[in-house]
Amino acid sequence: MDLRFDEITADILAHPLFQGLKEHCHHGKENTLYDHSLSTAYCAYRLALRFHLPEDRVRAVTRAALLHDFFLYDWRSEAHRRFVQQYKGWHRIARMHAFTHGALAARRASRRFDLDDRQRAAITCHMFPLAPMPKSAEGWILTLADKMVASREVSASMMCKVRRLYPRHSVA
């Protein structure tokens, strides 16, 4: 990708728990949570450079983006579905993955990696408007990068499904 990007992310990418993200599908079966996190981090890195952020803030947003989905569970599992279903009404909605995983990822990433308050806040709010509004450039860049990458992944996943439903017929 880029030597600076590689230097910023090397310790996280080598971590065994982060490597475990390769086992979880995300935004369709075509990519993993690891792939999504890496793509989001690179997108955030490029955006931070384009917006001329200082080096320390480029590093901060890149690392936050790499860890933004470091929640360490399979949100599509039966166990998680049962956890959410034990609640009713708004309490159930408030515990759904889309609303909670940012804060959980920030807490879990903080336990294993040295994150500052700005990075934790960016991870926590990356699901805006389903999460609190970002209050820093890092938060906005991470939110934008995640939306861009997720849109591309979901679109690719949908195209695979459409192609399976409507295969092209060859003309003789």
Image (cartoon, grey):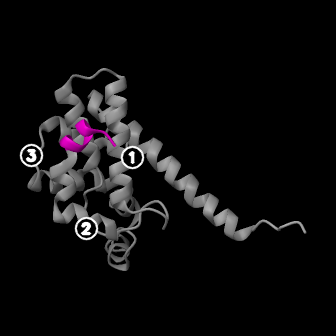
Asked which secondary structure carries label 2, the reply is helix
Q: Which residue is mark 1?
A: 130
Pointer 1 or 2: first along the chain: 2
Q: Is residue 152 visible?
A: yes
**Mark linked to residue 114:** 3
- Which mark lies nearer to you, 1 or 2? 2
Pointer 1 or 3: first along the chain: 3
Image quarter where the C terminus lies is bottom right
Query: Where is residue 101 drawn, in percent x and y?
Result: 30, 56
Q: Are marks 1 and 3 in contact (CB under 8 Å)?
A: no
Relative depth, front residue between 133 and 160: 160
**Mark linked to residue 20:** 2
Q: Is residue 72 visible?
A: no
Q: Are marks 3 and 2 in contact (CB under 8 Å)?
A: no
The stretch in magenta equals 1-8
Query: Where is residue 149 drawn, in percent x and y?
Result: 45, 46
Asked which secondary structure carries label 3, the reply is loop
